[in-house]
Amino acid sequence: QVQLVESGGGLVQAGGSLRLSCAASGSIFSINAMGWYRQAPGKQRELVASISSEGSTNYADFVKGRFTISRDNAKNMVYLQMNSLKPEDTAVYYCKMLVVSITSKVYQYWGQGTQVTVSS
């Protein structure tokens, strides 16, 4: 079993910054893609950014130039640096990882979510 634990959310004023972290623990051989998603009240969960095992990144248009995703493979962690935050960035942010088990099977895991609130 694998657990993902997120941290770093909170309340920030518009224009401010936050850094989210997500740590994976448990039966992990390696981790393929990692990503951050968000879900605002009344809306569907949407992709914010993803990063491959080789470090290739992908961003949603609404965060390009403001957010940066990174990973630390040695620590099984993924980060999301969020700058120039806007009130519309308010949401619960979730990390997701594609974990390769010691039996070479790939499983998808989600974190529990961390609230980000941006005040105007």
Image (cartoon, rainbow, N blue to C red):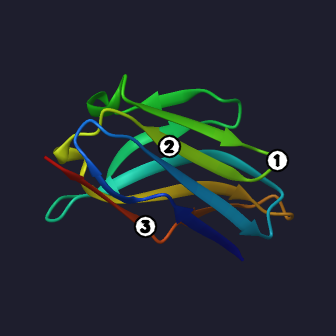
Q: CA distance from mark 2 to mark 1?
A: 17 Å
Q: Which mark is residue 113?
A: 3
Instruction: Determine which residue is flagged by label 1.
Output: 74
Quarter assignment of residue 70: top right
Res 88 quadrant in image:
top left
- Which residue is pictured at 61% across the width and 48% down the height? 78
Q: Position of residue 44 (x, y in %)?
A: 23, 58
> Is residue 11 visible to the viewer in this orientation of the structure?
yes
Residue 45 shows up from this direction? no
First reached walking from the N terminus: tag 2 or tag 3: 2
Q: Dot 2 lies on which element?
A: strand
Between 103 and 23, the residue placed more toward the observer is 23
Residue 83 position in % (x across, y down): 38, 34
Q: Position of residue 36 (x, y in %)?
A: 46, 49
Q: How would you rate the neighbour count of disc 3 (Cα within 10 Å): few for under 14, some for 14-19, many for 20 or more?
A: many
Q: Amino acid at mark 1?
A: Ala
Vertical position of residue 58 compared to residue 50: above or below: above
* Furthest residue in direction bottom, as rendered: 1
Mark positioned earlier in the residue sequence (1 or 3): 1
Q: Amino acid at mark 3?
A: Gly
How many other residues sit within 10 Å of disc 1, few (<14), some (14-19) or many (≥20)?
A: few
The dot on residue 107 is none
The residue tagged 2 is 80
Q: Earlier in the sequence, mark 2 or mark 1?
A: 1
* Rendered position, 27 above or below 64: below
Give the residue drawn at x 78%, y 52%: 75
**Could you say whether the residue bearing mark 1 is in a helix, strand or loop?**
loop
Looking at the image, how many numbered discs can be counted on the residues? 3
Q: CA distance from mark 1 to mark 3?
A: 23 Å
- Residue at point 81%, 58% (across, down): 104
Q: Nearer the viewer, residue 85 or 60?
A: 85
Q: Answer left or right for 31 relative to 9.
A: right
